[in-house]
Amino acid sequence: MMNAIRFVFALLLACSILPIQAQNTLEYYLPEGFTYNPDIPTPQSILGFEVGDWHASHDQVVMYMQAVAASSERVSIEIIGRSYELRPQVVLTITSPNNHNNLDQIKEERKKLRDPAASPDVQNMPLVMWAGYAVHGNEASAVNAALLSAYHFAAANEIEAALEDIIIVLDPALNPDGVNRFASWVNSHKSYVLNGDPNSRELNEAWPRGRTNHYWFDLNRDWLPAQHPESRNRVAKFQEWLPNIHLDHHEMGTNSTFFFQPGIPARNHPLTPKKNFELTEKIGQYHAKHLDKIGSLYYSQESFDDFYYGKGSTYPDVQGSIGILFEQASSRGHLQESIYGPLTFAFTIRNQFVTTLSSFEAAKEMRIELNTFMR
């Protein structure tokens, strides 16, 4: 009897120290019809886990972005400043090697879009798409989707020609301190066997939560007042690039689906040009097509506003840009039961990544139209 007890105890002990097994694959996320340069490291090869198996901490996100930049001639990385907790704000510039050799010239040409006396060449000017993720640190599907976006745009062979006409400015973590606070919480409370009970400790982050920055300020209200270093650094870089499209990836309540703008028409700001909303809706057709392809539910024009210019989806609207808000139903951890069934972290990441890809397709096909609109 004693030997049997010892055997069971040893078995339980062995099980308790096994590493948490991988649950996701890169193939789950990547779109069909693309091949990838093997010289570009995958997120798993650098981080030791597949995207969606763990919540990447901010230092891990930076580590991966540095690895991608070091391995690809399409990618350069820049530290544009630091948060209150001294975490670096990194931005990737992703485009063709030819464009990389002429970035200063391209920026100078883009300044002419705001000069009534100038004659910019909108027909041949590259479009700039800014992809921003997780201004709210506990909206983690966004920042983890940034890992996939960096990999795809650096490694996909079939987009090489398109990158002659498009410059992607990828901001993987708009709120570095909040991102790290939240990742620490959910990873510390993750179970070996995932527990989707909404009452689970993993899914109920303690105050002050990861939404805000070090001083508990909501950085998605700070684009216009620009009172915090994260905002000042980002707005300065925004003005340097004058992007045509600005992607603003967020999360909302678990018992929802996926939202993309346009928002509620009655809540549009009257100073925003009508053409802006028309272009937002036209770009929305690309999101719908891509989400249909993977069978994800979505909606538009029934929630959220385009009014306050201090948000990441509205500040661009008075800059000649098209700001686009994305809201993904949040798993708030690795798994949570919702009214639609189990909501996995990986599923939420995939939707965010897919709408980055749909935005890229829209940018490619609407380049001249969007440059003309900014002009």
Image (cartoon, helix red, strand yellow):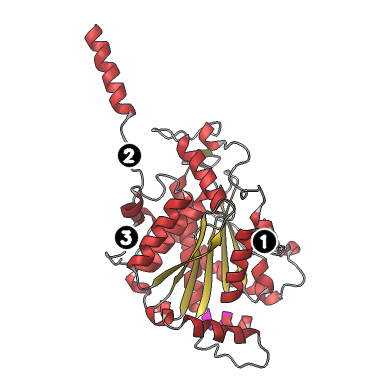
Three-letter amino acid code of the residue under disc 1: Lys
Residue 214: percent from the left, percent from the top?
A: 61, 48
Q: Quick check: can you spot residue 54?
A: yes
Please report the residue visible at 45 percent of the width from the left and 35 percent of the height from the top. 190
Spatial CA span between label 2 and label 1: 39 Å
Would you say the magenta stretch is mainly helix, strand or loop?
Answer: helix
Three-letter amino acid code of the residue under disc 2: Gln
Q: Is residue 352 left or right of residue 220?
A: left
Residue 114: percent from the left, percent from the top?
A: 65, 84
> Which residue reaches farthest top?
1
Residue 61 counted in the magenta span: no
Contact? badges 3 and 1 (CB < 8 Å): no
Q: Secondary structure at mark 3?
A: loop
Q: Which mark is residue 41?
A: 3
**Which one is nearer the viewer's eye here, 323 or 27?**
323
Spatial CA span between label 3 and label 1: 34 Å
Three-letter amino acid code of the residue under disc 3: Pro
Q: Which mark is residue 21?
A: 2
Contact? badges 2 and 1 (CB < 8 Å): no
Q: Secondary structure at mark 2?
A: loop
Spatial CA span between label 2 and label 3: 21 Å
> Which residue reaches farthest front?
86
